[in-house]
Image (cartoon, helix red, strand yellow):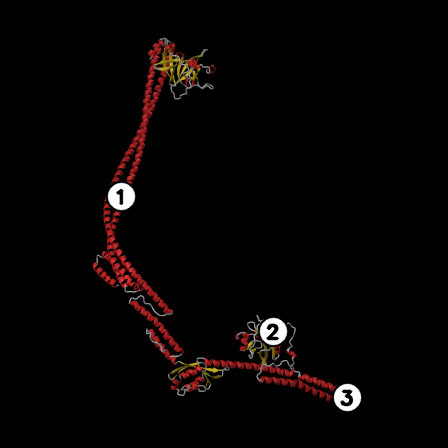
């Protein structure tokens, strides 16, 4: 079972007199819903049609109720009961549902349901019952409990009773052999049977019929909501049920018809009020409907139409034939008859032009019902089109004062005309302003601005133009300021040029002096180089001599050492002599001792010994002297050797020194040569510098001329700029004149100094300046 | 000079042989001299006093050599050349024996008269008075006349020498 959630406790009340009507197919899918149902359910039609009916089922509804519904319907009987339905948002509403199956060709085809507003008592009862059903505390009687026929059984009951009675009465009589009395049994039976049939007729059949008649009467009175009992037994019950079905069906049809009528009414009212001009004709071409708009339109054009159709009257259109509009009605008729789809055309009646859009009107079965014609008076439109075309042509070639006559047109065209005029005005206004500003700019007025209230692109134009003017004003101001500083700059450049010229001259003189000095220097350096090479050769000689000296001193040393060794030998020999003298002395002493010992005999011997000793002592002393001399000479020779050695060393040092001197002198010679080359290069450079200086001098002159020209141009520039008047100047005009005059006075001597070459032109220009300034 | 000395010798004078030790000229009686020799290295004798230079062989006889410098506590001078040894006949009162005396150099032979010999003043030098016979002046030079017997036979020397010689 489908369970739709969520649910709320809010109950929605049904609108009185508006029944909720639906149709479903045999599977319970919705095939039709009426607007009242859609409104209360909260779903849209699309959400409902094609869905199963249980989409609106409320979870409080017991399954048993629906089971009862479906079994009843499947049995071909109508079902009446209270149902609680759920809205889309969870709210609920109670309805009395009248559901009936519909037969087509003798078979069940669909179900129809008409729901009305139940009484509060019924709702309370139903709520209680459904609650019990949900708790399984109660059951619903099935449709089987309601029998479809009971007349036969009732009559049979009476027949059996009467047969029994006749038998009971006849049997005893038969056995009593009063055979004539046997007839009494069947008679009594017959009487009972007759009573029974009568009772059935009176109680059941007639009552049922009269109830049915009663209900049918109510239906004929238009009451489709009465509660017809559907639970009666027997044939009369069936009859009532059929009545119920009829009641539901009729209720539905009536509801539907009411709805259709409402819809048609809505459409007619809508058509009445649309601005399009609509007219309808039946198949014979007779006008059956005109809306207000078409009447208004034709009334307005009536006079013009009467030129062609003199009998035309817009107020009596209804009922007249549509052919009345045409000179050739048969053509028109053929056209309308053959109309299968929309057709549009244009017709001219008098000076007027109309558009017609004709379409066939057919019903749902495709039967032609007539035609609908939509009229349009495009006379104004065409006139306006040509006017607009002219205006656009004018505007595109720059003629902007053409305007449309707005009075001539009405409605949309009138609005368009007014709009276009306004548009042109709003375009022309800024253009005129721009023209004015530019014209004033042409006259040198920089303070002019666009005046007026502009919007959109025009506002942007205005802003841009203003910005441009402000910028221009700024630039002019700056140029004015700058032209002054350019003039003073030119003056300074002029002065600077004079100084530069002087300096260049003195530089040239200095360069000449430098060149002369460099020549002298060249000579000196050459002399140096020569001297250095002479010194070098002298040093070479000295070196050779010193080397010779060294060799000689080496030889001397050698000789000295030889002398020394000879002296040593001599010393040794003298040593020997000395020794001999000592020994001799010793011998003589011993002899003297012997002589002393011999006494007087030894006297002579003692004398000899004394003489010997004497000789020995003399030879010893001579040897000592020689030894002294030799050792002296040896020491002297040694000293000499040392000196010679030292002189040798000194000579070696001299040789090294001379070598160094030679190297240095060589370097000096080389350096002198390089110097000479360098000086040559310096000479070349000085020559270049000289040339450059001369060129500089020439350039300085040119610059002087150029700066004069520049000064002149600056003056011209100022004159030109004076043409423009800006806000600052306007306000300061009176104040500015005095300082400007003084500035001119200051400037003039400088001009004279700078422009001695062209005094004539300068004088004229300065004269004109003065005049200008005075005017200022 | 020779003449003078000869004349003085005739006047009963005594003949002296002079020699040099450390620049000073000393003299001894020439009759005490056996011979004069040049100095050659002597053979060292162990345990001998420091002024004994050693012993040497003189023609088969072993004689001790006394260094007079050491004996006089004068430092030795090895640079000296031609040093001589004067071989003396020393009489210690019991017997006569030969002893060598090493001196720096010899000088002269003098004849000195007895009256020219003057006694030495007492305690004038390190040399004991007993070794000096007297002082004499020859040719303006002071000459110390030594008593070599006393000098070379002093108590401390003689027993050892005796032992060594024997």
Q: Out of A380 and A657, give the one closest to the viewer.
A: A380
Q: Which residue is mark 1?
A: A673
Q: Nearer the viewer, mark 2 or mark 1?
A: 2
| Quadrant of the rendering where the C terminus of chain A is positioned | bottom left
SS state under label 3: helix
**Percent x, y for residue A266?**
49, 80
Question: Which secondary structure, mark 1?
Answer: helix
Label 3, label 2: how many angstroms apart (C-alpha)?
66 Å
Name the residue furthest right.
A176
Q: What residue is rendered at 36% in x and 19% in y?
A: A579
Crowding at dot 2, Cα within 10 Å, few <14 / some 14-19 / many 20+, comes out as some
Q: Nearer the viewer, mark 3 or mark 2?
A: 2
Q: Nearer the viewer, residue B25 or B81?
A: B25
- Tags 3 and 2 both on a single chain: yes
Q: Are marks 3 and 2 in contact (CB under 8 Å)?
A: no
Residue under pointer 3: A173
Q: CA distance from mark 2 to mark 1?
A: 134 Å
**Which label number is shown at residue A61?**
2
């Amino acid at each position: 079972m489908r369970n739709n959630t969520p649910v709320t406790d809010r109950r929605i009340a049904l609108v009185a007199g508006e029944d909720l009507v639906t149709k479903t197919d045999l599977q319970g899918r919705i095939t039709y819903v009426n607007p009242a149902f859609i409104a209360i359910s909260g779903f849209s039609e699309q959400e409902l049609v094609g869905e199963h009916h249980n989409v609106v089922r409320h979870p409080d509804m017991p399954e048993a109720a629906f089971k009862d519904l479906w079994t009843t319907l499947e049995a071909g009987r109508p079902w009446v009961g209270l149902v609680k339905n759920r809205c889309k948002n969870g709210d609920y509403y109670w309805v009395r549902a009248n559901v009936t199956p519909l037969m087509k060709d003798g078979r069940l085809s669909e179900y129809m349901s008409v729901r009305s507003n139940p009484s509060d008592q019924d709702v309370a009862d139903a709520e209680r019952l459904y609650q019990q059903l949900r708790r399984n505390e109660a059951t619903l009687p099935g449709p089987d409990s309601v029998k479809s026929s009971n007349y036969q059984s009732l009559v049979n009951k009476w027949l059996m009773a009467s047969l029994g009675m006749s038998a009971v009465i006849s049997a005893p009589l038969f056995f009593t052999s009063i055979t004539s009395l046997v007839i009494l049994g069947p008679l009594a039976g017959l009487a009972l049977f007759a009573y029974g049939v009568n009772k059935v007729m009176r109680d059941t059949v007639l009552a049922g019929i009269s109830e049915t008649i009663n209900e049918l009467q109510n239906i004929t009175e238009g009451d489709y909501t009465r509660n017809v009992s559907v639970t009666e037994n027997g044939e009369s019950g069936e009859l009532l049920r059929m009545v119920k079905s009829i009641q539901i069906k009729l209720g539905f049809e009536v509801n539907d018809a009411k709805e259709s009528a409402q819809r048609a009414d809505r459409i007619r009212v809508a058509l009445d009020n649309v601005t399009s001009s609509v007219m309808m004709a039946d198949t014979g071409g007779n006008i059956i409907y005109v809306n207000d708009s078409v009447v208004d339109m034709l009334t307005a054009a009536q006079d013009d139409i009467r030129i062609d159709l003199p009998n035309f009257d817009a107020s009596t259109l209804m009922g007249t034939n549509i052919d009345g509009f045409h000179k050739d009605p048969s053509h028109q008729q053929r056209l309308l008859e053959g109309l299968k789809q929309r057709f549009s055309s244009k017709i001219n009646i008098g000076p007027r032009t109309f558009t017609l859009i004709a379409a066939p009107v057919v019903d749902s079965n495709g039967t032609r019902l007539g035609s609908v014609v939509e009229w349009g008076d495009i006379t104004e439109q065409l006139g306006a089109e040509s006017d607009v075309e002219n205006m656009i042509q004018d505007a595109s070639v720059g003629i902007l004062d053409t305007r449309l006559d707005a009075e001539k047109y009405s409605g949309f065209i009138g609005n368009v005309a007014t709009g276009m005029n306004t548009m042109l005005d709003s375009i022309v206004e800024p253009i005129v302003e721009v023209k004015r500003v530019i014209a004033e700019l042409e006259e040198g007025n920089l303070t002019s601005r666009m005046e007026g209230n502009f919007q959109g692109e025009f506002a942007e134009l205005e802003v841009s133009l203003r910005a441009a003017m402000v910028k221009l004003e700024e630039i002019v101001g700056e140029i004015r300021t700058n032209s002054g500083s350019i003039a003073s700059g030119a003056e300074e450049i002029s002065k600077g040029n004079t100084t530069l010229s002087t300096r260049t001259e003195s530089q040239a003189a200095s360069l000449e002096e430098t060149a002369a000095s460099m020549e002298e220097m060249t000579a000196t350096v050459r002399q140096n180089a020569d001297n250095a090479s002479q010194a070098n050769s002298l040093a070479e000689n000295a070196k050779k001599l010193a080397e010779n000296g060294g060799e000689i001193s080496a030889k001397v040393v050698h000789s000295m050492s030889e002398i020394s060794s000879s002296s040593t030998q001599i010393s040794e020999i003298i040593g020997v002599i000395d020794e001999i003298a000592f020994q001799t002395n010793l011998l003589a002493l011993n002899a003297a001792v012997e002589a002393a010992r011999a006494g007087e005999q030894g006297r002579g011997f003692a004398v000899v010994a004394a003489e010997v000793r004497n000789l020995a002592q003399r030879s010893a002393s001579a040897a000592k002297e020689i030894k002294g001399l030799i050792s002296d000479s040896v020491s002297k020779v040694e000293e000499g050797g040392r000196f010679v050695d030292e002189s040798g060393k000194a000579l070696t040092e001299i040789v090294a020194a001379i070598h160094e001197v030679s190297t240095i002198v060589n370097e000096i010679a080389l350096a002198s040569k390089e110097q000479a080359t360098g000086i040559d290069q310096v000479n070349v450079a000085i020559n270049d510098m000289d040339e450059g200086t001369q060129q500089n001098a020439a350039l300085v002159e040119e610059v002087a001329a150029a700066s004069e020209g520049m000064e002149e141009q600056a003056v011209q520039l100022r004159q030109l700029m004076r043409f423009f008047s800006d806000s600052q100047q306007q306000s300061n005009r009176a104040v500015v004149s005095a300082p400007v005059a003084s500035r001119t006075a200051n400037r003039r001597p400088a001009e004279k100094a700078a422009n001695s070459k062209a005094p004539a032109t300068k004088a004229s220009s300065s004269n004109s300046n003065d005049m200008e300034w005075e005017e200022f | 000079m020779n003449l003078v000395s000869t004349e003085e010798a005739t006047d009963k004078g005594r003949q002296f042989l002079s020699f040099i030790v450390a620049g000073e000229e000393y003299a001894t009686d020439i009759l005490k001299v056996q011979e004069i020799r040049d100095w050659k290295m002597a053979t060292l004798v162990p345990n001998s006093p420091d002024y004994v230079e050693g012993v040497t062989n003189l023609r088969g006889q072993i004689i001790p050599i006394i260094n007079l410098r050491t004996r006089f506590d004068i430092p030795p001078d090895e640079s000296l050349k031609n040093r001589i040894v004067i071989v003396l006949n020393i009489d210690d009162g019991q017997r006569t024996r030969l002893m060598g005396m090493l001196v720096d150099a010899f000088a002269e032979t003098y004849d000195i008269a007895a009256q020219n010999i003057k006694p030495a003043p007492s305690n004038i030098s390190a040399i004991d008075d007993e070794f000096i016979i007297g002082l004499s002046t020859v040719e303006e030079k002071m000459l110390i006349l030594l008593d070599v017997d006393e000098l070379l036979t002093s108590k401390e020397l003689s027993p050892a020498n005796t032992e060594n010689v024997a």
